[in-house]
Image (cartoon, rainbow, N blue to C red):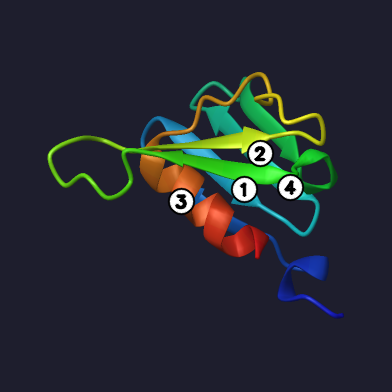
Amino acid sequence: MISVFDTNPVVFESTDRILTVSYNGVLCKDSNGQVITDIDFDDVNELHLTRYLNSNSNYSIIFRDHNWKNIEGQDLDPPDALVAAQLLH
């Protein structure tokens, strides 16, 4: 299947982060260009959502690998993670 992300990644910029979602994964860098998060979609087996339906609390989206373990280095704010999760599918 052909995806729009094959040639055109989606880039979201804020004052402190740049989030790039491409066909292969998610890359988040801070304002200094240091990589905060680098997740390859081939390594993602599951998205684990916590507190998602609770309007009184922040929610979390955790990317899990093929061994059902949390992928290390996931420093995405919930809105960033939600965008990445929606674009993953």
The reply to whether callout 3 and callout 1 are in contact (CB within 8 Å) is no
Q: Nearer the viewer, mark 2 or mark 3?
A: 3
Residue placed under numbered mark 4 in the picture? 25
Q: Amino acid at mark 2?
A: Leu
Residue placed under numbered mark 1 in the picture? 20
- Please give left or right for residue 86 compared with residue 5 in the image: left
Report how many numbered discs are placed on residues in the image: 4
Q: Nearer the viewer, mark 1 or mark 4?
A: 4
Residue placed under numbered mark 2 in the picture? 27
Distance between the alpha carbons at the discs numbered 2 and 3 = 14 Å
Q: Is residue 84 above or below residue 29?
A: below
Distance between the alpha carbons at the discs numbered 1 and 2 = 5 Å
Q: Amino acid at mark 3?
A: Leu
Residue positioned 39% across, 40% down in the render: 78
Q: Amino acid at mark 1?
A: Thr
Tell me where residue 2 sits by quadrant: bottom right
Q: What kind of element bears circle 2?
A: strand
Q: Nearer the viewer, mark 2 or mark 4?
A: 4
Q: Nearer the viewer, mark 3 or mark 1?
A: 3
Distance between the alpha carbons at the discs numbered 3 and 4 = 13 Å
Circle 1 residues within 10 Å: few <14, some 14–19, many ≥20: some
Tell me where residue 35 sits by quadrant: top right
**Where's residue 5, x and y in %?**
74, 67
